[in-house]
């Protein structure tokens, strides 16, 4: 009985830590350089176009905000429901789009980012965003 309790406790702790930290294949970071963050309109247009071209009902991301005082936020894409070839195409499209988004601030693309709750500001909230 004691061994079963220890086993269940270990499994619970492993599952809890896996939920707390997650590795995302691609994260888009919106940064400010004095006057707010760039518009996400080009990104939303790209996502809608990609979704239609590849016959997907929706794409989702986790919006992690606020990351600073001027509206900085991150969009973390898990891409877990995509096939490997579509993941690569999606990320390549983001790589060509991101350098064009330069109004007001900057946008940065980070691949294979592991997000640990301890590394985030205390006021951060995570919200799932669906692009349809």
Image (cartoon, helix red, strand yellow):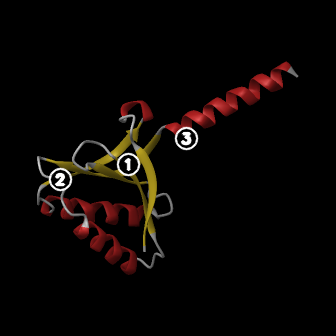
Q: Is residue 100 left or right of residue 61?
A: left
In the image, 123 versus 10, the foreground residue is: 123
Query: Residue at position x 40%, y 39% from top?
Result: 115
What residue sits right under mark 2 in the picture?
36
Query: Of helix, strand and loop, which one carries label 2?
Result: loop
Tag 1 near tag 2, CB within 8 Å: no
Q: Residues within 10 Å of mark 1 (few under 14, many from 20)?
A: some
| Residue 31 placement (x, y as % from top left) | 20, 48
User: In the rendered structure, which disc, 3 or 2, sits on the residue that comes first in sequence?
Assistant: 3
Query: Of helix, strand and loop, which one carries label 1?
Result: strand
Instruction: Determine the CA span between mark 3 and mark 1.
Output: 15 Å
User: In the rendered structure, which disc, 1 or 2, sits on the residue that comes first in sequence?
Assistant: 2
Query: Residue at position x 84%, y 19% from top?
Result: 2
What residue sits right under mark 3 in the picture?
19
User: In the rendered structure, which disc, 3 or 1, sits on the residue that comes first in sequence?
Assistant: 3
| Residue 93 placement (x, y as % from top left) | 26, 66
Nearer the camera: disc 3 or disc 2: 2
Quadrant assignment, res 4? top right
Q: Residues within 10 Å of mark 3 (few under 14, many from 20)?
A: few
Relative to 72, residue 84 above or below: below
Residue extending farthest to the top is 2
């Amino acid at each position: 009985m004691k061994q079963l309790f220890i086993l269940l406790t270990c499994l619970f702790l492993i599952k809890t830590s896996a939920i707390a930290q997650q590795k995302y294949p691609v994260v888009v970071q919106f940064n400010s350089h004095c006057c707010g963050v760039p518009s996400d309109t080009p990104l939303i247009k790209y996502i809608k176009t990609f979704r239609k071209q590849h016959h997907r009902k929706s794409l989702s991301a986790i919006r992690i905000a606020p990351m600073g005082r001027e509206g900085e936020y991150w969009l973390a894409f898990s891409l877990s429901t995509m096939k490997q070839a579509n993941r690569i195409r999606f990320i390549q499209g983001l790589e060509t789009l991101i350098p064009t988004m330069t109004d007001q601030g900057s946008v940065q693309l980070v691949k294979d980012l592991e997000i640990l709750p301890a590394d985030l500001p205390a006021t951060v909230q995570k919200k799932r965003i669906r692009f349809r």
